[in-house]
Amino acid sequence: MRRFLMFLAIVAGVCAFVASSASASGPTQIVFSKTGAFSPSLGPFGFWIWCEGESTNPYHGQCNGAMYFYSLIAATKHVAGGVTELSEGVYQMTVASTLDDSVSCTLTNAAAPKGGPNNTVNVSCTVPAGSGSSTTAVVNVTGN
């Protein structure tokens, strides 16, 4: 429960940052969010990752957020990495834990984002080894 609360605190902080810095005509920002996902190889897992897409600022292409794998890793892990737009509205985030080698994953939304928890995000990890997907993820793209 403590890990989940820490995860929620990280999410709330990043949400506040994104909300305060996003604008309708500003830089593209991409957020993938899902708690309570499950796969046979990863077990229960979740993610909340924010990325800066197209922009002229120094954060262009960078991602920050958190991932957890409830039955495999003892704590929620801060992750950072990069984002690429594969096609119109389809993004791929490649992230890894910043303090150790416990997480290395790629997350990709399957189609252009739909409002609410109605998006498919595929997750493939080399550490912990496994893959999964969620059809109820939130994918939010602003500023494009």
Image (spheres, helix red, strand yellow):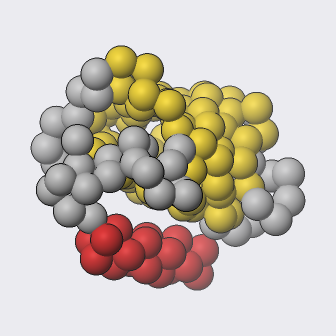
Q: Position of residue 61 (x, y in %)?
A: 53, 44
Residue visible at 28% across and 77% down? 20
Instruction: Tell me if 9 is positioned left or right of 16 in this view.
Output: right
- The front one of 115 and 60 is 60
Residue most extreme to the front:
56
Does residue 68 show up?
A: no
Q: Position of residue 130 (x, y in %)?
A: 68, 30
Above or below residue 119? Residue 99 is below
Residue most extreme to the top:
87
* Count of residue discs: 0
- The front one of 118 and 71 is 118
Quadrant in which the N terminus appears: bottom right
Above or below residue 43? Residue 9 is below
Instruction: Tell me if 53 is positioned left or right of 78 in this view.
Output: left
Q: Quadrant of residue 113?
A: top left
Q: Quadrant of residue 112?
A: top left
Q: Quadrant of residue 137?
A: top left
Residue visible at 51% across and 49% down? 60
Instruction: Tell me if 37 is positioned left or right of 127 in this view.
Output: left
Residue most extreme to the right:
100
Above or below residue 41? Residue 86 is above
- The front one of 54 and 85 is 54
Quadrant in which the C terminus appears: top left
Does residue 137 show up?
A: yes
Above or below residue 54? Residue 77 is below
Q: Position of residue 38 (x, y in %)?
A: 49, 41
Residue visible at 44% across and 51% down? 56
- The front one of 8 and 64 is 64
Instruction: Tell me if 138 is positioned left or right of 58 in this view.
Output: left
